[in-house]
Image (cartoon, rainbow, N blue to C red):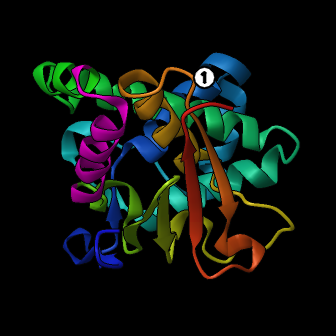
Amino acid sequence: MDGGFVPVAAAEARIGPNAITQLVAVLDRVEGRALRDQVMAAAGVAVPDPALGMIPEADAAAVHLALRMAVPERAEGLLRLAGLATGSYILRHRIPRVAQWVIRALPAPLGARVLAGAIARHAWTFAGSGAFRIAGWRPLVFEVAGNPLVAGLRGDHPMCHWHAAVFERLFARLVWKGCVVREVACAAAGDGACRFEVLPHA
């Protein structure tokens, strides 16, 4: 383990714009502009300009909540698609190709450690005011305490589909082709933190 939760103070309650922009792209592609406009209007949030950098985490949380309210039966699948798209964006624009090549060339357990370390160093971009830690290595486990994207939500099952999909896309492309990420605990389901298991195979 890497020593405990790391507070993401540098983010100052902000989060990366992909938490909204990739969801907007998915809604436009899968559902159509009408639902996208409905969700954004209900959230009271404008589509952010990625060039302007980090956005208030409250805006992302409001958009995710508005989606859950608008189409509760489809929201989880749409959030998963947005998370996968976010992972693809990170691979295209945030992880240098040389670094990707190095991770792929390493034995999988070592590559997983390198990628997990990079994720931990950049946790402020997806955890906002929450705190991220690597909670275990066999299996690889991530935890986010105080996840702002599910703050205030209550349900009978884990709800962090966006986060799980981001992790899954990164590890599936760089470490384990058949990787599956399962959220096994969630603050929205009454647990102390949102907990993700990164499994080499389904």
Amino acid bearing label 1 = Asp
Nearer-the-camera pick, 200 or 130: 200
Task: Kindly identify the residue that appears in the image at 32 percent across and 49 percent down.
Answer: 116
Highlighted range, magenta: 105-121
Q: Quick check: 201 left or right of 117? A: right
Q: Percent x, y for residue 28?
A: 60, 22
Nearer-the-camera pick, 135 or 69: 135
Q: Percent x, y for residue 159?
A: 71, 57
**Residue 49 drawn in magenta:** no
Residue 23 in view (yes/no)? no
Q: Is most of the magenta stretch helix, strand or loop?
A: helix
Task: Kindly identify the residue that appears in the image at 55 percent across and 31 percent down.
Answer: 179
Task: Kindly identify the residue that appears in the image at 50 percent across and 20 percent down.
Answer: 177
Q: Is residue 32 above or below residue 143?
A: above
Nearer-the-camera pick, 111 or 11: 111
Q: Is residue 186 above or below residue 104?
A: below
